[in-house]
Image (cartoon, helix red, strand yellow):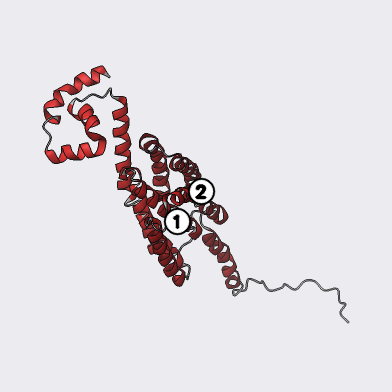
Amino acid sequence: MDALKSALQPLQPITNNLPAPIRDLGVSIIGETCYKTLILDLDPTATECVKLAISKGLGIGIIGASSIVKVPQIIKLVQSRSASGISFLSYLLETSSYLISLAYNVRNGFPFSTFGETALIMGQNVVITVLVLNYSGKASAAALFVAALAAAAFSLFTENVVDMKTMSLLQAGAGVLGVGSKIPQILAIWQEGGTGQLSAFTVFNYLAGSLSRIFTTLQEVDDKLILYGFIAGFALNLVLAAQMVYYWNAPSAKARGKMKEAPLAAGPASSGTSTATPKSKGPTTRRRG
């Protein structure tokens, strides 16, 4: 590490003369002390500051990726106009969990880099849930879902309605909801024998994001409730990713049903052409008179 530090020293004239907006941004992300150590002094031996910088970088990366993580899923639903392979219950539980976690993090004043993706993914979840209900012929249920979500958000962000003690209890429940939200989706894939309209991009990004969140939570948030939730979520995201690989080329249950119907439909058509051959006259045993 000393050799690396020595190799970086020629860059100090550059790092010590960065524009004020860049400097202010760096200080706001990693703090005055770590900014001086890592940027001004170019000292990579400060382990704690290096860990903090990695954690902040991962957090910002997760937030950036989360802004589009479920866009492919939305596109697949709109293009296919089918909710095949998508569990409504899974999205309902996950959205409820994210709403509680968002309110809990905001009201506790935790760094935005540790939970920012929650708000972005929750918004995309709402869109997906509404589409799933609409394509399942339940448009009225979609309207009811949005109204209930808005009422719940108002209550959770208002201290006079839900106090912090209750929020802590709800956050514990949110961890269970978040973990439990994966189970209906896992079961739906297993029952259908395929992933249907489920987006591989979304599944694998969730897996990477939940693993990164374990690291950022360990570094920046001293809250076991949040940490255990991310660990359990990673385990179930791993199961979903394994299912995605296993059923990669498997047709859905609907497609398999069509494949079975095809030979039956072809059966009557083949009977229209007679293949019978005329019976040949065999020798007779009748005596002629």
* Mark drawn on residue 176: 2
Pick the quarter of the image with the C terminus. Answer: bottom right
Seen in the picture, residue 282 relative to 242 is either above or below; the reply is below
Q: On the picture, is 36 further left or further right than 157?
A: left
Tell whether label 1 touches label 2 (CB within 8 Å). no
Mark 1 — residue?
96
Depth order, front residue of 50/184: 50
What amino acid is at disc 1? Ser
- Kindly state the secondary structure of the residue where label 1 is placed: helix
Seen in the picture, residue 42 relative to 111 is either above or below; the reply is above
Q: On the picture, is 43 further left or further right than 287?
A: left
- Neighbor class of circle 1 (other Cα within 10 Å; few <14, some 14-19, many 20+) is many
Question: Where residue 175 sits in the image (x, y, percent)?
Answer: 48, 47
Question: Where residue 237 sits in the image (x, y, percent)?
Answer: 47, 45
Question: Where residue 10 sits in the image (x, y, percent)?
Answer: 14, 23
Question: Which quadrant holds residue 152?
Answer: bottom left
Q: On the picture, is 140 further left or further right than 262?
A: left
Q: CA distance from mark 2 to mark 1?
A: 11 Å
Seen in the picture, residue 183 relative to 130 is either above or below; the reply is above
